[in-house]
Amino acid sequence: MKTVVLGSGGWGTALSLVLHRNGHPVTLWSHVPEKAAYMERARENPRLEGVPLPPELRLTADMTCLTEAELVVVAVPSYAVRETAHAAAPLLRPDTLLVTAAKGIERDTHLRMSQILEQETGGAFPIAALSGPSHAEEVGRGLPTGCVAASVSQAAALTVQDAFMNDRFRVYTSPDIVGVELSGALKNVVALACGICDGMGYQDNTKALLMTRAMVELCHLGERLGGDRQTFGGLAGMGDLIVTCTSMHSRNRRAGILLGQGKSIGQTLAETGGVVEGYYAAASMHQLAEKTGVEMPICRCVYEILYRQRPVQEVARELMGRARKGEIEDGWRYPVG
Ligand SMILES: NC(=O)C1=CN([C@@H]2O[C@H](COP(=O)(O)OP(=O)(O)OC[C@H]3O[C@@H](n4cnc5c(N)ncnc54)[C@H](O)[C@@H]3O)[C@@H](O)[C@H]2O)C=CC1
Ligand SMILES: O=C(CO)COP(=O)(O)O
């Protein structure tokens, strides 16, 4: 299958390598010609140091490569998905399958990445999302990894599974594209929270408390927005939450560590290197929580640290000082009497 990957950051490059290992011709598109030219010369992406790019992998900054593509993967940062899809749309073949690999929710519109692709391409193409616990640094080196290919179209999900699956990259299918995309976007806010917790010098107990209670918040919002609760407990949900909250590969966690150490948001974003999706997702999530009335104390606190300069110590005191309650609000009742 002829494939094009749009976005030559760490993730687009790692996914190109998976497709290449599976025998598909791959073109990796960069939005700036200098970047494509650098990778052509060095046969390496600085984001994936020590991972050679095979000679057959085509590198370009020319979008006309799309005219031949049967499968197009969109792996640019979430803020660039709309402009990238808009530019790509007129060049697509009528039977192209689109796969979003970006993790975010558009600010103000609250659209998921697949919905942006659908809007910009006029709803004419099958669309799937590929998401899960998958740091580019490890996928690039061929370390065992698992993801979910989600689409309302079973045929599309199966095609994506087929294209990417190999003995180092397992792909499960799912009809719940809403839950899969929301999980991937929202867990980045929790990774920021866990990084902040690390940066403040708190340890494993605190992080387990944060991850677990934040997952309850994600499930409440995710279900309200149409996702399936089981998805949040799966690879794209809990799996990705674990990897992002605990790995030093995670930009979101590393950004959180700097914030927890007292750095400003400006310094943090400048020093982290690479896109910190949780920064954008926190704003969308805050708007969504307000709109739906879902209570999300941990995520709200992350938003207030990022956008209202609230001191992290004050936030920690607020969260630990919340009113006492049962663990499962609607589920468990003590017998009367
Ligand atoms: N790095 C990872 O391990 C994973 C990343 N993702 C997601 O993939 C998406 C891309 O992330 P990374 O590849 O890690 O990014 P990165 O931080 O490695 O690089 C960002 C890339 O985006 C490009 N870019 C910036 N502005 C652009 C624009 N306006 N149009 C097109 N390209 C633009 C930059 O040139 C750069 O190549 C994000 O949504 C991220 O959450 C998903 C799974 C794993
Ligand atoms: O989504 C990811 C891993 O699954 C990447 O996380 P970061 O964006 O925090 O690096």
Image (cartoon, rainbow, N blue to C red):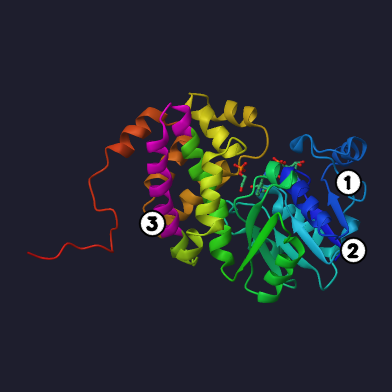
Relative to 223, say whether 168 is above or below.
Answer: above
Q: In the image, which is nearer the foreground, mark 3 or mark 1?
A: 1
Mark 2 surroundings within 10 Å by alpha-carbon count, few (fewer than 14), some (14 through 19), many (20 or more): some
Label ID, residue 294: 3
What span is in magenta?
196-221
Q: Residue at x 52, y 51 (%)?
A: 186
Q: Position of residue 144 (x, y in %)?
A: 67, 51
Which quarter of the image is occupied by the C terminus? bottom left
Q: Does the Cβ of the disc 1 residue fall within 8 Å of ligand 1?
A: no
Q: Residue at x 43, y 52 (%)?
A: 215
For marks 2 and 1, the one nearer the N-term is 1
Give the quarter of the image for residue 208: top left
The residues tagged by marks 2 and 1 sit, at their Cα atoms, a distance apart of: 23 Å
Where is ligand 1, by quadrant?
top right
Mark 3 surroundings within 10 Å by alpha-carbon count, few (fewer than 14), some (14 through 19), many (20 or more): some
Q: Does the Cβ of the disc 3 residue fall within 8 Å of ligand 2?
A: no
Relative to 41, say whether 6 is above or below.
Answer: below
Disc count in the image? 3
